[in-house]
Image (tube, rainbow, N blue to C red):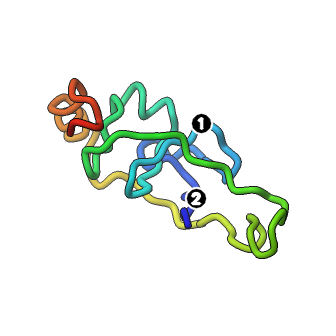
């Protein structure tokens, strides 16, 4: 199941489990929509993949054992391991290639 990481790895904005402005790559690298659009240009700085909206985990237990209360979101904050200049250079090499063609 998804970790539901608590923050944008770029700007450190809080991204709670119900946040609809959260984007993830296939490795679950987590960023806010603003950083994905304006800083990363839909290029994950960690793997080079694209982003999709992160699903919201239900708060209520509609099926036994499946809910945010049973499977809580992660509290471990993560941050970019690259400088913004490195991110910009990396994004520039891939941003004109659709994610499905990378």
Badge 1 density bin: few <14, some 14–19, many ≥20, Cα 10 Å: few
Question: In which quadrant will I find the C terminus?
Answer: top left
Element at label 1: loop
Q: Is residue 85 visible?
A: no
Q: Quadrant of residue 66?
A: bottom right
Q: Quadrant of residue 95?
A: top left
Residue farthest to the front, as pictured: 63
Q: Residue at x 22, y 24 (%)?
A: 96
Q: Residue at x 84, y 60 (%)?
A: 60
For the residue pair 12 and 24, the one nearer the viewer reads as 24
Q: Residue at x 28, y 37 (%)?
A: 100
Element at label 2: loop
Compared across the picture, whether 73 is left or right of 96 comes to right
Q: Which mark is residue 21?
A: 1
For the residue pair 52 and 46, the one nearer the viewer reads as 52
Comes first in the chain, label 1 or label 2: 2
Q: Is residue 79 visible?
A: yes
Expressed as whole percent of the image width and height from the top left, the position of residue 91 reads 23, 34
The correct choice, above or below, for 30 with respect to 73 in the image is: above
Compared across the picture, whether 10 is left or right of 62 comes to left
Between the residue at mark 1 and the residue at mark 2, the CA separation in whole angstroms equals: 13 Å
Compared across the picture, whether 93 is left or right of 21 comes to left
Q: Residue under circle 2?
A: 4
The correct choice, above or below, for 76 with respect to 99 in the image is: below
Q: Which mark is residue 61?
A: none
């Amino acid at each position: 199941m998804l970790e539901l990481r608590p923050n944008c790895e770029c700007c450190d904005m809080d991204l709670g489990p119900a946040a609809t402005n959260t984007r993830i790559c296939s490795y679950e690298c987590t960023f806010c929509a603003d950083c994905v659009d304006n800083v990363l240009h839909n290029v994950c700085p960690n793997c080079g993949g694209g982003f999709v909206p992160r699903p919201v985990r239900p708060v209520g237990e509609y099926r036994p054992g499946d809910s945010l209360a049973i499977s809580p979101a992660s509290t471990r904050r993560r941050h970019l391991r690259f400088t913004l200049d490195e991110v910009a250079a990396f994004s520039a090499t891939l941003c004109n290639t659709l994610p499905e063609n990378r």
